[in-house]
Image (cartoon, grey):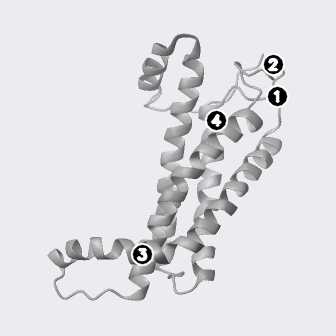
Amino acid sequence: MSQVNTIRNPLDRFILSVAGRFGSKSKEVERFLKFAIVGMMGAVVDVGTLVVLQATILPPRTNTSVIIATTIAFLAAVTHNFLWNRFWTYPDSRSRSVRRQMVQFTIVSISGWIIRTLWITLAYQPLGDLFFPVVLPLIHLFRPEYIPSATAISKLGTIAAQLIGIAVIVNWNFLANRFWTYNDVAGSDNAKNTPVA
């Protein structure tokens, strides 16, 4: 078997020590922890991209601008997450070509994106209206004269809806990718041992 390309991370030692406490389940715990860390980094990419887009070229003035901004943020996070999961979380998953796994990963991600986008589109305005009165007293501590605009309320609502969406979709993504995209790794009932370069 050829050497697989993998990414080394400063967290590897900690992850292995935690996962090692789970005996025969240690490899799955290791994968879950890595997937969760990749997901957290992806959430930073996702939300960070959204914040930058809404602060610059795509302010949330319409449903269309919210959909475009959240979609661009989503695509940045999917690319990030696929690369990290392919080379760090599942470096032993090589019975399929990188193209096939990218297609499968993208299908899973698009399914999650559709659900998340519908959620965000329906929820961003009500969540902004709900949370802004809670945040406004904090803002007034630093800017007593601040009067919120509709755009500011929509920005807060979009970020709140996106964070809730990320929390739900990460579970879908882990399960679907573990049992479909990366089902060829050791420990799976469908494990295959033929590596693909």
Q: Amino acid at mark 2?
A: Asn
> Along the polypeptide, which appears first: circle 4 or circle 3?
4
Q: Is residue 192 left or right of residue 156?
A: right
Residue 5 higher or lower than 172, as above or below: above
Q: Relative to residue 14, is residue 127 depicted above or below?
A: below
Q: Which residue is mark 3?
A: 128
Q: Nearer the viewer, mark 2 or mark 4?
A: 2
Up the image or down, 15 lies above or below 82; here it is above
Mark 2 secondary-structure assignment: loop
In front of the other: 44 or 149: 149
* Disc 1: CA contacts within 10 A as few (<14), some (14-19) or many (>=20): some
Placement of 48 over or under 82, stated as above or below:
below
The mark nearer the N terminus, 1 or 4, is 4
How much space separates mark 2 and mark 3, taking CA atoms? 50 Å
C-alpha span from label 4 to label 3: 38 Å
Q: Please, what is the three-letter code of the amino acid marked with disc 1?
A: Ser
Indicate which disc, 2 or 1, sits on the residue closer to the N terminus.
1
Residue 88 rendering spot, x and y as whole percentages: 59, 33
Q: Tag 4 or tag 2, which sits nearer the N-term?
A: 4
**Horizontal side of residue 122 vs 95, given as left or right:** left
Number of labelled discs?
4
Reading the image, the residue beneath label 1 is 95
Which label belongs to residue 193? Answer: 2
